[in-house]
Amino acid sequence: MKKALILILTTGMTIGSIYALIHYIGMQSFSFAWILNFLLMASVLTFTETLKSPLTSPYFDTKPWERKGEIYESFGINIYRKLLVLTGWEKLNKKANPIAKNINALTHLYYKTKQSELGHIIILFVVFSFNIFVAFQYGIVKSLWLFILNILLNLYPVLLQRYNRPRIARAISLSKF
């Protein structure tokens, strides 16, 4: 009952906040794109933390072409990682989720990559929907901030989780010996 109430309240507050955001700021600005992304991040985080799904879908399994990470490196994932360090996000994230050198911490980190990826995928599609609407309603130029921030705040984090997960899995398998 408590979970259902949290999920219903979160959904209602998110919809109300997005409505207020559209009403007071409009949909064509950098401010709208920025606030929308972080509002959705807070909402999706509440959902994933409340539900605590085991995330056992085969989708999360590492594909053979992903194992070495070369595909993600060709998309500039290492540059993105450096950008996270330069902006202080990496330090903030490690402070919230410290990494210990034991199997339980690695297993928790492995799960967190799945949880983070799921959240960013959901947000990616929601923001993409807004992006399409704004492009058709106001023109492509007015939708550029939504597009750019969606790439930086959602697509690249998904790629980063998929890049990191095989490395964490290797560390877990090495820790078992």
Image (cartoon, helix red, strand yellow):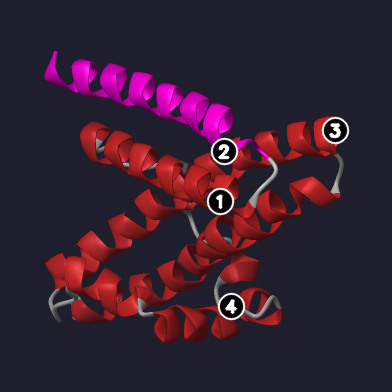
100, above or below 124, in the image: below
In space, the residues marked 2 and 3 are separated at their CA atoms by 18 Å
Side of 9 where 78 appears, left or right: right
Q: Callout 2: few (<14), some (14-19), or many (20+) C-alpha neighbours within 10 Å?
A: some
Residue 177 in percent (x, y) is at 19, 81
Residue type highlighted by circle 1: Ser
Residue nearer the viewer, 50 or 61 = 50
Q: Which of marks 3 and 1 is nearer the N terminus?
A: 1
Q: Name the residue under label 4.
A: 77
Query: Which residue was labeled with disc 1?
Result: 31
Type of the residue with mark 2: Ile
Q: Can residue 53 be seen in this view?
A: no
Would you say residue 23 sits in the magenta stretch?
yes
Depth-wise, is mark 2 or mark 3 nearer the camera? Answer: 2
Range drawn in magenta: 1-27
* Left or right of 130 on screen, residue 39: left
Which element is circle 4 on?
A: helix
| Residue 4 in the image, given as x and y percentages of width and height | 23, 16
How far apart marks 1 and 4 lie (CA) works out to 26 Å
The residue where tag 2 is placed is 25
Q: Quadrant of residue 151?
A: bottom right
Question: In the image, what residue type sits under mark 4?
Answer: Ile
